[in-house]
Amino acid sequence: MNTDSHPLELLMLARTRFTQQQIASFLGKNVKTVWRWEKRKTPCPPMLKPALRELLNSTSRQMTHTPSSFTFIDLFAGIGGIRKGFELQGGRCVFTSEWDTYAQKTYKENFIDDHEINGDITKVEADGIPDHDVLLAGFPCQPFSIAGVSKKNALGRAHGFACDTQGTLFFDICRILEVKRPKAFLLENVKNLMSHDKGRTWEIIKNSLIELGYDIFPKVVDGAHFVPQHRERILIVGYRREDQIPFSWDQVYLPPKGNMILGDILHREDGKEPFLEWDGDRFFNHGENRVQSKYTLTPKLWAYLQSYAEKHRAKGNGFGYGLVNHQSVTRTLSARYYKDGSEILVYQGEGVNPRRLTPRECARLMGLPDTFRIPVSDTRAYKQFGNSVVMPVMREVAVAMVPFLFEENQGFQLEMESLTA
């Protein structure tokens, strides 16, 4: 995003890296004032632009570190997109689980921990997981088998969630919630989780979480509120029922869609693309101010994609490539993007084959800052970003969730609610 633009845009860019408290301290303001700017309750003053630019240009690691006010665990962690959002609100990760070794490599490159990454969560005893305030999990959606439930019940072998979810990775979330009883959780999954298996999968998930003593608040959120990509995911917020938390999705800041366009995240070919020492010229040729030619489709692949699309158009189907330009909002980036890039192809002008997004552009499309490092091959990177989350969505959910973790903060949170009414 152009840093000469409106001060609110600079503020929102700063919020991808810093907490409200950090920004308030840097500007000499209080948290409530920053909150009101962010929620557009009061205008963000133009006079703050120089200070916000200074903050964004800061390379001090001390600015991005504050004492943790709460702890969380990161399950099915991927490359840490959910974690990043909660760290920005002062959280500290005390346990991580991710089975894919390539995702582990990216995770380790971007997060410094005093604990090892656990590979297979099914082999971890819940008692051995540290106590924590929040459980975070972008869990895989596996089929839930209804068959055999009655037989198990008849034999007295299982009941409730243990019976319905056994054999799925969701069961591991349930057993950790049962033993550790964190104050809250955030679960993330694909949009069609609610309709999967004619709604039976969602009924099992919902009933299992309720049986474990949690109030749940599900909502489908589109990443296009924050990035130029339609990416709808179901988010399930949960709090312990005995705490009687009045969480509402109305408290989560979701700016209007369309504020961000693809041109905001594409490499700049006008000489203004920042040089990132951890990327070098891997994705962008800074000497020639252009994206590396390897991302342009070969004539053979481009001809194949056009032929494939035409064949399905003739049959009345909607299958085909997605050609985008600087003004576009893209389709959902998928884990198969490495194969041909067909869902998001960047138009490069008449007579020039389109190109894939570079992995750096994919990171930006997921709302990750340019400080996020990409230590794996392009193929692995495409898979990882395609399986990741839109980080600013997680950040804003954390902004709404975290104050409810502490009794002393709930008065402030209720005041914020009254301002949004």
Image: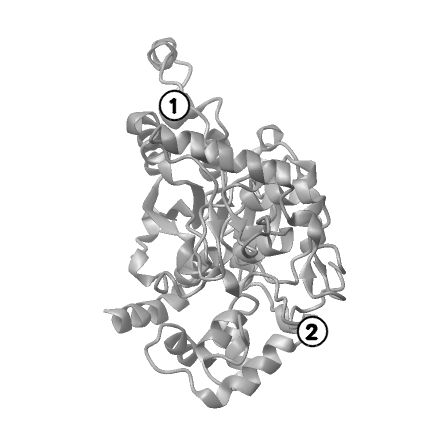
User: Where 210 falls versus 19 (above or below)?
Assistant: above
- Residues under labels 1 and 2: Cα distance? 50 Å
Q: Residue 366, percent across and down? A: 53, 54
Q: Quadrant of residue 101?
A: top right
Tell me what residue is drawn at x 41 percent, y 45 percent.
233
The image position of residue 99, as x and y in percent, is: 63, 35
Q: Nearer the viewer, residue 264 or 66?
A: 264
Q: Is residue 348 visible?
A: yes
Quarter of image, res 226: bottom left
Q: Nearer the viewer, residue 399 or 341?
A: 341
Q: Which mark is residue 233?
A: none
The residue carrying mark 1 is 164
Whether residue 336 is visible, yes or no, is: no
The residue at which mark 2 appears reads as 59
From this viewpoint, which residue is outermost toward the front?
Answer: 351
Q: Position of residue 227 (x, y in %)?
A: 46, 59
**Is residue 1 found left or right of 146 in the rendered image?**
right
Q: Secondary structure at mark 2?
A: loop
Q: Residue at x 69, y 56 (%)?
A: 373
- Estimate how packed mark 1 is, as few (under 14), some (14 to 19) or many (20 or more) residues with alpha carbons within 10 Å: many
Amino acid type at circle 2 is Thr
